[in-house]
Image: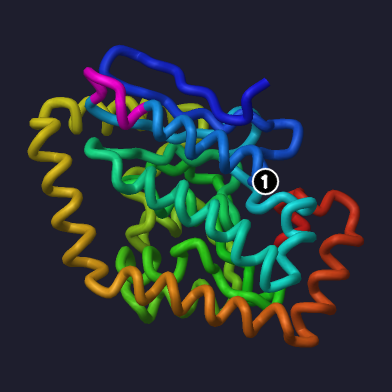
Amino acid sequence: MTPVRIEREGPVAHLVLARPQRRNALDEELIEGLDNAVGELEGATGIGAVVVRGEGPGFSAGIDASTLARLASPEGLQQIRGAFVTAYERLERLPVPTVASVHGWAIGAGFELALACDLRVVAGDATLGLPETRMGVVPDVGGTGRLAALIGAGRAKELILTSAMIDGARAGRLGIANRVAPAAKLAAATCGLVDELLACSATANGLAKRIIDQAARPMWNDTLDAELDAQLQCIQTPEFADAYRRFLAAPGANSPQARR
């Protein structure tokens, strides 16, 4: 089974993370599948919006433990992170609006994937967060820059420097979620937002989102480089080594609870 599949509903394309047995944890195969799926959408016609969602009980529990095990070396970090950054950037550059439909949890690299979408519809009881600093590292797939651009430096610092986990209701208050809905009504709320997007010009929306991204993050490439430099320093510290061993040894390492 492909770890990412495309479902078309008229002018709407759904990118579905289809690894529910691993809580849609992000490994190299899934990231490759995401990159390939986005590539298919780049050449498709008649698409006015893209929805990114997770199959099963949650959006994504973050990076897979098996992939994390390869990030402890500078070579592994640069190779694997490069694949993540490429896929997320490619998704962000799609010339139509993208909407993350988040239920259950979006943690770490899973949250960063939701941040790479233009808009987010979040279930009120969902759990979102960037727990990297508790692991002795930093969010390094664009999470620091995208979150700061979205909610401001002060609030981004609070969430990242405390490794806070927040629910969908707080995500809405902070401006991370554009819409918040009860879990049972998440699909309907997502469809409602998509319908509003489809009522506008696809060409104008594509151009507008590009201008907004450039205005909000004028030094984007520098930010990505700074994330990598910081991560290379972090993986050589005792704090990371200790947290890394504890995480990989914990039962259910890919569970959202293990990342709190």
Is 26 on the left-hand or right-hand side of 111? right
Evaluate whether residue 260 shows in this view.
Answer: no
19 w.r.t. 143: above or below: above
Residue at the image position 18 percent from the left and 30 percent from the top? 196
Q: Measuring from the top left, give residue 212's x and y in whole percent.
A: 17, 57
- Residue 92 counted in the magenta span: no
Dominant secondary structure of the magenta stretch?
loop
Tell me the residue at 65%/66% (across/down). 77
Which is nearer the eye, 245 or 128? 245
Place of residue 21 in the rendered image (x, y in percent of width and height, measured from the top left): 75, 32
In the image, is residue 44 part of the stretch drawn in magenta? yes
Tell me where residue 200 appears, x and y as whole percent: 10, 31
Residue carrying label 1: 27
The amino acid type found where label 1 is placed reads: Asp
Residue placed at 32% from the left, 69% from the top? 220
In depth, the one of 250 and 77 nearer the eye is 77
SS at badge 1: loop
Among the 4 quarters of the image, the one containing residue 60:
top right
Crowding near the residue tagged with mark 1, few <14, some 14–19, many ≥20 C-alpha atoms within 10 Å: many
State the residue at coordinates (46%, 47%). 87
Answer above or below: position of 71 versus 20.
Answer: below
**Relative to 36, residue 221 above or below:** below
Closest to the observer: 242 or 219?
Answer: 219
Q: What stretch is highlighted in magenta?
A: 41-47
Q: Position of residue 27 (x, y in %)?
A: 67, 46
Residue 43 visible (yes or no): yes
Question: Toward which corner of the image does residue 9 lie, by quadrant?
Answer: top left
